Every structure is written in structure tokens, then in C-alpha cells.
Image (tube, grey):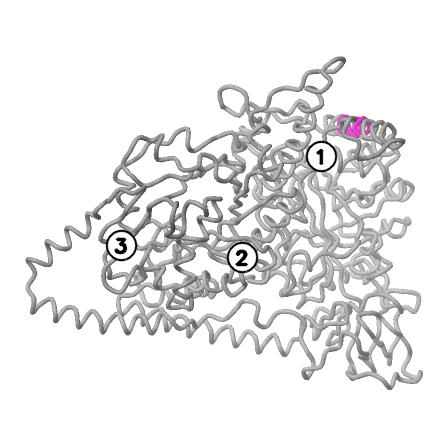
Amino acid sequence: MPGQRTDSGQRGPGDEISKVTPEFRAVRGYSPDKKTIESLRELGFTTAVIAPTRGIIRGTSALIALAENDPNELVLKSDVFQHIAFETQDGDDGAYPAALMGAIATVRQRFFDAQHYILDQADWHKKPQGRKRPEFDPSLEALTPPAEGKQRALFEPGSALMVDRAARVARELKLDFAIVSCGQEWRRPDLAKETGATFIVPVNFPNLPKLPNEDDWEQVTLDNLRAWDWASENPTLLRQQKLDIALTTYSLADKKAFRKNVRQAMDRGLSEDDALAALTTVPAKLCGMDKQLGTIGPGKIANLTIVDGKGYFDPEARVRELWVDGRNYHVQSAKEEAKKDDAADKDKEAKDKAEKEKKVAELKELQSKRVARSPMEGRGAITNFGRNLDRNTLQVRNVTVWTCGPSRKFENGIVQFRSGKVLKVSHGGDAEFDGAILTYDGEGKHVTPGLIDAHSHAAILGAVNEPTLPSTAMCRIGDVVNSETRNIQDELAGGLTTANLLHGSANPIGGQNQIIKLRDGASPEGLKFEDAPQGIKFALGENVKQSNWGEKFTTRFPQSRMGVPTFYRNRFTAAQQYLKEWKAWRDKVAPISSLNPDILPPRRDLELEAIGEIIEGRRFIHCHSYRQDEILAFLRVMESFNVRVATLQHVLEGYKIADEIAKHGAGASCFADWWAYKFEVYDAIPFAGSLMRERGVLVSFNSDSADLARRLNTEAAKAVKFGGTPAEEALKFVTINAAKQLGIDKRVGSLEPGKDADFVLWSGNPMDSRSVVLQTWIDGKKYFDRDEAIKRADALKQERADLIAKAKKLAKLGGSGGDGGGDDDGSFFRVSLEHQFDGHERHCMEGEE
């Protein structure tokens, strides 16, 4: 972004982002360490890949022979992979990127830059006259091989859902790729399978914790126990998905545990053939060295591993010697063991061996049987008596129907659904549909459309904000949708079916939104609301000028309220110019061919591309706002660019300028009764929504809270209490009005024929705080049933008890379920990215106030 380039702290040419160092080459700094080489040879390794470990785009690795020789002779391949990790930081230094979505955006932008760099350099060398010489960029030079498909990119996603995102980003960028396993693909094996990638799999299984008190087990979560019990089965699970795997010592705190942990994986189903391939042929092929390594054959490098006893996969068998590049190496541990054997007392040795074998057998039997169940069990659409309702008809009869449409509210109603759509809404006096395979008699019950939250952060992986730059329009919430958070189940229990996932309010121009349906059990892509209009988060006020961020955050523009409109003009003017450049290029190539290589296209800028879509009317603005003076200034700036704002979010002083908002055509998505929680909201009142509705503004109520989203029905009821809004109109605040603001009202928001079968069955009047949700349906499929939820909770409670019993028994036998897991108890208690924020509030300024 112009004016936002920072000093990366590196000497010489390079990328402005310090975590982007693709030009780094591990081979350049390689200095053989005898102790490390010997420790790997003791495990039977003859070659190893040395890799960079810091940053997002980290640089290239090298394949090294584990011999004792001149470094030049040890390098078998200098640039094996370009390493990419979705690494994040806390953002305290203000450097972009700090959030997961920013890391992904960085990878995407840099590879688009590399593609343009290739074209730009070729164009200049072909016809240098009359044009500016392109600048040299070692970072983009280094990305040229993977961008052209000549070098494999190795992604380290860090979580089960990011495995899917890494594969999608790689395919978008047309990269040849492999993936470093996070060890938790068991959470979503379907997503791992869809990648079709080869996985490099660490065997860093977590150890059981040493708890000071027996009662402390009550504080251990089911997810921690599942992660511990599933860990050693993860390699097997990947092979069951028909994926090639290579095993690695990477991330093991104690590498001596490698063979023991591989044996544990084999006890959980990994075949000996697969385990052997994972240490020989698969890594050789992955490194592009299968003609030289991986098998014993004429002409291949003479690397051999010699093991005594029952073979390599018996952890008790000793690696006796290795041949590396035709040179023999005796393993030190084998020599020492031989000395011990000579001096050992034979009788005591035999007795100890028998006791040890008995204990090992008990441990093996206990460890080889998984108790943990798949987290996918009990999720997804709930079937009715085993019948699939996708293409058949169901009806709910004898209920009070709140249509939130032209038919309004009526009693003794019948609602019929077929193939995921509303078929008919009628009064009880009308003839019933006799072809329904399921009829639910809801006497005394109420049916409403599924509730819609116009402002949510409940299902976002990682940070809600990319807080570093004043414009992060290139960041996409769609990259970080969290399908695994329990917030989805909690919100389904409150009747929520659709949510607008928004970036936070740390920047004047934030990231792109993602509208989702709460289809529990679906993948992140499966949650996304198909063909919903694209949007983006903007913000005004204290947050964007960093008023409460602390003394370290006083240099980013803008730092004042008057600077915010200036910044908008700057970025929108830049986007206008960007659109003109692309139009001029298209006008040039159109008469010939859009594929004409002689006409260099402009550089693709993902930030300006998103803002350009706003100018073109293809992306909606959802703007966080409080004060009336700022709202008016913002609307006027947008009008100067012929842009209509879709919604003003929160809009606490909107009641003061309701006529102006209505004239502009913006919607108002506000809090029901939040006020006085910081200085700029002191004038907020609980009558605001009702007052704006009376002046012709399209009003919705939102949550901005994973907790509050569970009861949007009673939030809507506050409009009745405070503002005297009719109950039917108040319910529209969380149904059809929100749908209209998001541009999805042709599909959801009301019960009308042809719309999606998203509906909620309530025990009573939805405006009554005593009413509860009995069932929640999306697309004609039941995703929440109160009775089923109680049964599921009981099953989860029993699973946790069984896992604790297993853990206690293993601990008593002296086992851990894993060895060398990274940091002892820490690895056991590590919370997955998918569940990092379960049970926590998520709001606009999470982590910044």
C-alpha cells in the first residue's frame, strides 16, 4: 500500500514484510553439526531435509547426506521446497500481518506479485525502450520457480481446517504442493482427503500430564483427551484416506522417542509396508530424488541402515551400522549397549526382561485401543426415523406461524416443505398435503423463519481483526471460517440459521465479510451461503484512530476523526485509478486477444481490487459507527464516489439522523440496548431501533457477540418493550430485515413459497423469554433438536469419563500414550485453533481494548 511500506529490518534488497523471505536458502547457512548428525544416524537416518523455521514465506530447504565430509559434498539437493506457514503474531510491533487471515492474504498477494514479476521482467528484456525498468526483487525472484511449477511448495497450515485452506490457496495459485501434518487431521479427515496431497507427518504425540491432585482430572476437557487418544492414530487415518505420508522427527522434543512413537502408530493400524515407505520411497519421491534414493538398486546412492533383532520397527532392536554414500558408520549407542551386555548380570537381566515384557504387553493392549470418538459423530443433519427428507415433503401443522412476509402472523397454520424449500404456507382450514412423509403436530407451538445475525464474529479462526494497517481490504473472512466451533451448536439452539461474519473494527477499511448458514458438520466451504452478495467491513470512531490502544500505537494514520474521511478519499481515489488502468489494458487487448503476451497487464492489487468492487456496486459496505457527526461525514464521502452504504453497524446515534440515513438508503443494524460502555456511546438509547424504523430506515438488531446470538429473539422483543414496536415488526429485526440488508432476502428471512426451508419451532411465543427452541431446520434439514441435544450431551459426558479412566490406568502402568510430544504437559493441554475461543466472547475489538 502506498505510504505503508515499513522497514523489515533486513539488510539489502528484499520484501517489505519481515516474515516474507523466500530468498532465504537453508543450504547457504548449513554448517554440519557432528552431534546432531550422529543422533539422527542412531535413529537409522542417512539423509535429512534441513528447513527454515521462521516466517510466513520462509525460504528453501536442502537435502543433506548425514555423513562426515566437506559441506559441499553433503548437499544432495540445494533447493528442495519453498516453505510456507500460516504464522501469526500478536501485533504488538504493528507489523503486517498479525492475524491468520492476514498471513493467508500475504501468501496470495506475493504469489500474484511473482506472476506479474515474471511477465514484467520478460517484457522489459524484450522491449526496454520507452518504459520504466522494473525494480529487482530477490523475494519475487525466489518465488519464480514455485510460481512456474518448477519447485514444490511445502505448506505448514497448523490446524485441521487450515489444511483445507492451504490446499485451496495452492490450487488457486496453481502451485505444486505438499503439506506438513498438524497432527489433528483426525478432526476432519474428509478435508485432508480432498487435498490429495502428500503429508509429512510428525509423530510428536502428547504425553499424559502429571497432575498434582486426582481431582484435577475434572478440569481436563474432552477435547484435550480426544487429542491425546487420537494422536497416534493420525498417520493411519491419513493412509486410510489414500494419502501418501512421510514420517519425520520434526517438532519432537526428544528425537530418541521417534522409533517408539512410530511403533505406537503401527499398533494403531499403520502397516509395516506403509511405515517403511514413509521413511524411504515416499520422502525420496517428494524431494524429487527417487532415482537416487529410497530403494536399493544399481546406480543408486549407497545408503543402507542395518538393524539387529526383529527389524527397524521394533523399538528394542538396535541400529547397528549405517552406510552413507558408500561409507560405513557404526552407531555409538550400539557399541555402548554391547559393553553393558558384557558386564550385565544375566539372571537379573532375564528377570527384569520378563517383568518389562509383561508391562509392555499391558501398555500396548491399552494404548492400541482408541476410546475417543470422532468429533463428527452427532453432527450434521438429524435424520427422522432413518428417512432422508432431502427430496420429500414434510409439514408442520396446528402451529402459530410468524411468516415475516405478506401473510403476516396467523394461528392454526400449516407450513409445508419440499426439497429444501418452502412449498406452501396456509391456514388450518386449507386442505393438508397428503404426500408428506413426515407430519409434525405442533399444537401450542410457534414457527418462525430462521433467525439471522447481521453482525457476528462467532465462527472465525484466529483473530477477528487484522489490526496492523488502516486498510486490510485484501483480507478475507472466507479464508478463516471456523466450522468446528461449538458456537455453531449453541447458536442453533437459539434458533439462529444465518450469520454475517465480519472483520473487526480496528481499521477504517477492514477485511471482506462472509455470510454463512449454520450447517453444523459441514466444511468451511459448506457453511458459506451460496451466491450471497459480497461485503466488507468499514469502521469509524475511537477504534480506527487507536484511541485506547496504548502509547505504542500513535503513528498509524489516521489518528484523528477528521483523518478518517481523508483516508477514505485516498483509498477510493486510488481504487478508481486502479480500475482505469485495468480498463485501459482490456481496451488494448480486446481487439486482439486477452491472452496476448505482448501487452503487459497491470499488477493485481488485492486491496484495491476489493475497494474497486465497492465502487462498481459489486461489494456491500457494512460500517461500524456510533456518532452522528461521523456517520454524516462518512455518508457524504461515499456519495461523492456514487457509493451506497448497505448497513451502518451499531449506529448508536442513528436516531438523531434517521431521516438522513433513510434518504441515503443505508440500513441500520443496531444493538437492542447497549449503551455507556465507552465515551463515544454515551448518547445511545434503547429506543433507537424503533425510532429509526418509524422514520423509514430498514432496521435490524445484531449480536456482535457469540453469547448474545443465542437469544436474538428476546433482543427483538426489547423493541416491543422499549420502543412500542409491534411484535411482528420486531421479529423482522432479526429475520427479513437482516436478510434485506445482506441482499439475501430472496432466499431467507421469511416463510414464503420458494424460499429456503430455514425455520424454527418454538415451545411458545418467540417474544417470550420463557420460550425455548425445540427444533432448528436449515435447507429442509434438521440441525438442532432439543431432545437429541440432551442425549448427545449425555454421550459426551460418558466418553469423557471413559477417556479419563483410560488415562488414569495408563498413568498407573507408567505409560503416557506418547513420548517426546514437544513440551510435556504443555502439548497435552494445548488448545486447537478450532476451539481456541469456545466459550469466549468474540466482538469487534477483540484483543485491542
- Locate residue 770 relative to residue 791 in the image: left or right: right
Return the residue found at the far bottom.
434
Query: Are the two marked residues, 3 and 1, in contact with CB atoms closer than 8 angstroms?
Result: no
Residue at 80% over, 55% down: 738
Quarter of the image where the N terminus is located = top right
Label 2 – label 3 distance at C-alpha: 44 Å
Q: What segment is highlighted magenta in the picture? A: 570-578
Front position in the image: 569 or 59: 59
Q: Position of residue 269 (x, y in %)?
A: 42, 68
Does 545 sit above or below residue 203?
above
Residue at 31% over, 72% down: 809
Q: Is residue 824 magenta?
A: no
Residue occupied by mark 2: 835
Q: Position of residue 67 (x, y in %)?
A: 29, 39
- Locate residue 547 relative to residue 348 in the image: left or right: right
Disc 2 marks a residue whose amino acid type is His
N-term mark: 2 or 3? 3
Residue occupied by mark 3: 306
Front position in the image: 812 or 86: 86
Label 1: state its secondary structure.
Answer: helix
Q: Is residue 543 in view? A: no
Question: Dot 3, crowdedness within 10 Å: few (<14), some or many (≥20)?
Answer: some
N-term mark: 3 or 1? 3
Return the residue found at the far top.
129
Disc 3 marks a residue whose amino acid type is Ile
In this view, the mark in front (3 or 1):
3
Quarter-of-image position of residue 423: bottom right
N-term mark: 1 or 2? 1
Label 3: state its secondary structure.
Answer: strand
